[in-house]
Image (cartoon, helix red, strand yellow):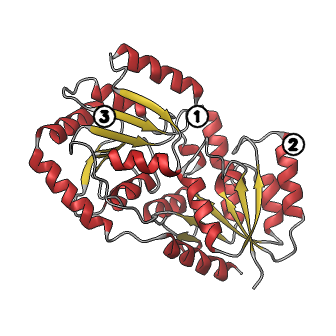
Amino acid sequence: MNPVHVVLPGDVDDATVPSGGNIYDRRVCERLDVRELAVRGTWPRPDDATREELARGLAALPDGAVVLADGLVACGVPEIVVPQADRLRLAVLVHLPLADETGLAPDVAADLDVRERETLSAAAAVVTTSPWAARRLAERHALASGRVHVVPPGTDPAPLAPGTDGASRLLCVASVTPLKAQDLLVEALATVAGPWELVCAGALSRAPDYVARLRDLITRRGLDGRVRLAGPLTGEELDAAYAEADLVVLTSRAETYGMVVAEALARGIPVLATAVGGVPATLGSDEPGILVPPGDAEALAGALRGWFGDPGLRDRLRAAARRRRTELDGWDTTSRLMAEVLEAVR
C-alpha cells in the first residue's frame, strides 16, 4: 500500500509552541505509513513565499495520492488546495474551525470562514475530533454528514498524579491566548481566598499582546507569586507539573475536544472546565470534574470556592476521575480510525 502524504504546519515539532493539534498530528504520523510535507509559515494566513512552497509541494505529489492535510494549513488557502483536490484524494483534518479563533476582526473571521468552506467542500473527506465538532462543521458549511468523520484524540499512558495537598495546586495547560481565556481564570481567582497556587503551562509567543495584558492583570490583582506563567512545558517537565496538580483548570472560550481534559483524567486528576464544544463529552457522565458556562468569571469563582471548601466534593471528583481514567482510548485507536477513513478515501 502506498503511503499517505500528510501536510502539516511547520511548527509541528517545535517545543516552544506545543499545541493539542500538533500533538495529535505527531501521534498519528508516528503510527501510520506517511510521507510528511511540513510547511513553516503564519497559518492560516501565510505570506507569498509560504504559499508558493505549499503549491510546489502539492503539485509534486502523484495523481491519485492520498493526502491528509491539517486544516490550519489547508483551509486558509483554497486557491492552492482546491485545484489539486481534483487529482488527489484529499482528506482535511479540522482541529478548530478557523473563524472560531478568539480575537479575530469580524471581516477576517468571515473571510476565513468562506475559505474554509471552499476547501472542505472540495475534499473527499473531512475529519474532526468530536461528534460535536462534526455536527458543527456539517451545519456550518452545508457538508453531507457522511463526508464528515470523527477521529477522537487518544491519550498517552500516565501514572496517577499524587498532587500536593489534594486541593491547592491548580494547573492550566494551554497556550496563553484569548481563546484559552487565562484572564478569566485570573479574575476569578482574585476573588477566591485560600493558599492556592496556579501554574499556567503553555506557549507565550502566540499572542504576545495578550500575554502582556495578562501579566499586568496578575500584578493589578495582587497575584504575583501565586500565578506563574511557566511557558511551554513538554516531556518530563510537563509530567512533573501534572504530578503536582490537584486540579486541572481549562477556561477556554472554544474547544472541539479538550485534549487537556483527557490528559488530566488519564492521571486521575479532577478537572474544572468551561462547558464548550466537545469538552462535556470528553469529561464524561460520571462527573470527574466541574463544568461552568464560558466567559463567566463569577461562576468560575463559585466553582473554585466549592472545590477549596468541600473536602467531600474533592474526594468524589477524584474518585470519578480515576474511574474515567480506565475508559480512555489510546493513540492506537485514533490511528486505526484514521486509517479506516483514509482507506475509504483511497
| Amino acid type, residue under disc 2 in the picture | Ala
Mark seen at residue 49: 2
In space, the residues marked 3 and 1 are separated at their CA atoms by 21 Å
The one of 116 and 306 positioned closer to us in this rendering: 306
Residue 336 place in picture, x, y as percent: 55, 78
The one of 121 and 183 positioned closer to us in this rendering: 183
| Amino acid type, residue under disc 3 in the picture | Asp
Of mark 3 and mark 1, the one earlier in the sequence is: 1
Residue 274 place in picture, x, y as percent: 34, 45
Left or right of 252 in this view: 203: right
Mark seen at residue 104: 1
Q: Is residue 36 above or below residue 98?
A: below
Residue 274 visible (yes or no): no
Residue 78 place in picture, x, y as percent: 76, 54
Of mark 2 and mark 3, the one earlier in the sequence is: 2
Residue located at (52% from left, 26% from top): 211
In space, the residues marked 2 and 3 are separated at their CA atoms by 42 Å
Circles 1 and 2 in contact, beta carbons < 8 Å: no
Q: Tag 2: Cα neighbours inside 10 Å, few (<14), some, or many (≥20)?
A: few
Q: Tag 1: Cα neighbours inside 10 Å, few (<14), some, or many (≥20)?
A: few
Of mark 1 and mark 2, the one earlier in the sequence is: 2
Q: Which residue carries the number 3 mark?
A: 296
Left or right of 213 in this view: 66: right
Residue located at (82% from left, 77% from top): 64
